[in-house]
């Protein structure tokens, strides 16, 4: 697990910025900066030239983010009817999406088709048969399981067929008259390096090229999923270096193939800052406790569901002592951070969470019926 990074103090203008936001909007807040998404999107395009980027809506299903990606000309990776409805409200054309959830109700397929989606992901024979009634309207990507031991979240345990099952599934699809456009994989989330991506690209490409020799409609789409990391350690992210092996592997596939990626965390994690307020304090067993108005049932939910450890910052300076930051619910599991050294804080002081765009607002709950952190953008809609 990533070690917690804590920053003590802040420049006067930074402190004034956060204090002004709270004075205007209240607390807690999730503050979105579209400029960061635009910058990270451009970096990823440079690092993976020729790869079509489909934003993973599940990472942060916000209309603000959808508008940013839409303006950049990006595509969208969707996995539910709710995500489809969000894109529909933002007038995103269905052909700019891929529906990547391998298991779907028939009603979800029909809804996505009405929206205009035409590319769907499956990973087993049973799901293939669901598309027989729609075979003239869809193209399928078969998802393959490649498990990366270094990933923070394993996304190939629950979904993806074994590689040796692919020939049988391809033959089955052909027998059903279903067009398989290509292969997809997702090696896991928050990958330390791209080694498993390279392995998956090489194996999928070899099979696709081998099948092309006998298949009258050869596969030409390779979806490399996501897994690009966020810099929770606050030492920066060299996206160019991380992507270099992936770029090299993709450079060896045929030029007429379409390569797709599904970035989520890497785009939105650094674009959102959480601003929460100390509402109370106590001393328990010699340790100072600070109670915040946001916690792990709220914006810090990714600490439970996503194995993330968000960098923190307090604005006040001074001598430090062992401290615990606790969330606002009645549950003792609601601990944002412990075994950290902080200066003495007072009610009303702000605590800032960085890199908090991915799987935070997306996974928060309404436990105790506490209000959600207000989501605001630094740019007008």
Image (cartoon, rainbow, N blue to C red):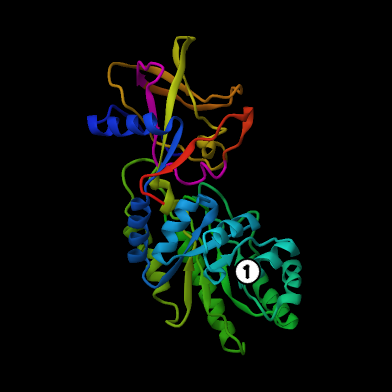
Farthest left residue? 12
**Residue 251 visible in the displayed image:** yes
* Residue 274 in the image, given as x and y percentages of width and height: 42, 36
Task: Count the marks.
Answer: 1
Residue 273 vertical placement versus 63 (above, below): above
Which sits in the foreground, 358 or 3?
A: 358
Left-right relation of 168 to 150 = right
* Residue 201 in the image, given as x and y percentages of width and height: 49, 69
| Residue 344 is covered by the magenta coloring | yes
- Figure quadrant of residue 304: top right
Residue for point 39% across, 30% down: 22
* Residue 130 in the image, given as x and y percentages of width and height: 75, 70
Left-right relation of 310 to 147 = left
Residue for point 43% across, 60% down: 69
Residue 8 vertical placement versus 217 (above, below): above
**Which class describes the residues within 10 Å of circle 1: few (<14), some (14-19), or many (20+)?**
many
Question: Which residue is identified by label 1?
Answer: 120
| Residue 195 is covered by the magenta coloring | no
Residue for point 38% across, 67% down: 48
| Range of magenta residues | 342-363
Residue 39 vertical placement versus 6 (above, below): below
Q: Secondary structure at mark 1?
A: strand
Which sits in the foreground, 261 or 59?
A: 59
Q: Main secondary structure of the magenta part?
A: loop
* Residue 193 in the image, given as x and y percentages of width and height: 42, 55
**Residue 191 visible in the displayed image:** no
Residue for point 52% across, 59% down: 90
């Amino acid at each position: 697990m990533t070690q917690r990074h804590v920053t003590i103090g802040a420049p006067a203008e930074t402190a004034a910025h956060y204090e002004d936001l709270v004075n205007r909007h209240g607390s807690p807040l999730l503050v979105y900066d579209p400029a960061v998404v635009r910058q990270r999107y451009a970096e990823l395009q440079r690092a993976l030239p020729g790869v079509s980027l489909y934003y993973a809506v599940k990472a942060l299903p916000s209309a603000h983010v959808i508008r940013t990606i839409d303006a950049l000309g990006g595509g969208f990776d969707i996995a539910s009817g709710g995500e489809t409805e969000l894109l529909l409200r933002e007038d995103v054309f269905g052909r700019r999406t891929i529906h990547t959830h391998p298991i779907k109700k028939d009603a979800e397929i029909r809804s996505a088709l009405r929206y205009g989606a035409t590319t769907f992901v499956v990973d087993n024979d049973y799901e293939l048969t669901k598309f027989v009634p729609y075979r003239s309207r869809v193209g399928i990507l078969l998802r393959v399981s490649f498990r990366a031991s270094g990933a923070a979240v394993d996304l190939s345990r629950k979904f993806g067929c074994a590689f040796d099952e692919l020939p049988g599934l391809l033959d089955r699809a052909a027998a059903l008259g279903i067009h398989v456009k290509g292969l997809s994989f997702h090696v896991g989330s928050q990958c330390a390096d791209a080694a498993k991506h390279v392995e998956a690209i090489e194996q999928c490409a070899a099979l696709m090229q081998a099948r092309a020799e006998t298949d009258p409609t050869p596969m030409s789409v390779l979806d490399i999923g996501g897994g690009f990391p966020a810099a929770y350690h606050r030492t920066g992210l060299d996206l160019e270096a991380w992507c270099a092996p992936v770029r090299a592997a993709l450079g060896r596939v045929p030029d007429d193939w379409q390569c797709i990626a599904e970035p989520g965390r890497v785009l939105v994690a650094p674009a959102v800052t959480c601003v929460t307020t100390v509402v109370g304090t106590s001393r328990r067993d010699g340790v100072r406790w600070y109670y915040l108005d946001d916690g792990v049932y709220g914006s810090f939910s990714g600490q439970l569901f996503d194995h993330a450890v968000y960098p923190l910052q307090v604005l006040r300076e001074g001598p430090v002592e062992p401290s615990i930051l606790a969330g606002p619910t009645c549950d003792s599991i609601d601990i944002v951070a412990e075994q950290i050294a902080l200066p003495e804080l007072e009610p009303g002081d702000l605590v800032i969470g960085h890199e908090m765009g991915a799987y935070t607002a997306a996974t928060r709950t309404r436990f105790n019926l506490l209000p959600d952190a207000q989501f605001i953008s630094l740019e007008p809609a």
